[in-house]
Amino acid sequence: MNKTKNMNESSFLKLFFAVVSACFIVAAFIMPDRATAFSGLVKILTGTCKVSTNYFALGGVSATFLNMGLVCLAMTLLFHFTKTTVNNVSTLAFLLTLGFCSWGIHIVNMWFVVLGVVVGNLIKKEKPMANVNAMLFSTGLAPLITDLMV
């Protein structure tokens, strides 16, 4: 407990993000429909990505929680490996993206938008992974991009 009291804000929030990720992944495997977690995740990944698509209805509770946990883990790793200082804006980006993971964003379609921000940074001659918050806020466009591709 004393270790968390001595942590700076950024480290504490990264730990919080990791705990949220772990909670969703664990929850996916303790739900009553846990046997369909992976088949439901495949339905989510291959289904339509319209914002009106309810992933709980499409793939089931455990598959949606697994999707949410995987996306949260990916976001946490983005913050960790880019050594981004996490603050209140990062928390907003994280939680907003987490909310969209139950309808519209999944572990595959979010990477096209992330890559778009990386390309934009390269064009502006900035560090490629400099704007992780912008990457997470931009994932709100992931369903539109996926529907346009399909």
Image (cartoon, rainbow, N blue to C red):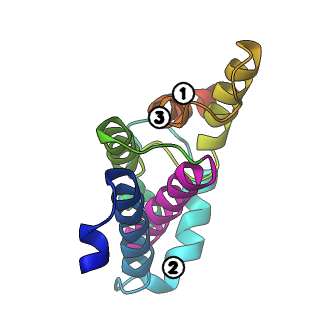
Residue 42 image position (x, y, % from top left):
62, 63
Residue 90 image position (x, y, % from top left):
38, 40
Mark closest to the chain's N terminus, 3 or 2: 2
Amino acid at the residue labelled 3: Asn
What residue is rendered at 39% in x and 46% in y? 94
Residue tagged by mark 2? 36
Residue tagged by mark 3? 133
Question: For the residues carrying marks 3 and 1, which lies nearer the camera in this image?
Answer: 3
What residue is rendered at 54% in x and 56% in y? 44
Residue at the top extreme of this rendering: 124
- In this rendering, is residue 41 above or below 3? above
The answer to whether the residues at label 2 and label 1 have Cβ atoms under 8 Å apart is no
What residue is rendered at 41% in x and 36% in y? 51
Question: For the residues carrying marks 2 and 1, which lies nearer the camera in this image?
Answer: 1
Quarter of the image where the N terminus is located? bottom left
Total numbered circles: 3
Amino acid at the residue labelled 2: Thr
Residue at the front extreme of this rendering: 6
Mark closest to the chain's N terminus, 3 or 1: 3
Q: Is residue 78 magenta?
A: yes
Q: Residues within 10 Å of mark 1 (few under 14, many from 20)?
A: some
- Give the magenta part as a residue range: 60-82
Q: CA distance from mark 3 to mark 1?
A: 19 Å
Residue tagged by mark 1? 144
Q: Is residue 22 magenta?
A: no
Q: Is residue 100 left or right of residue 35?
A: left
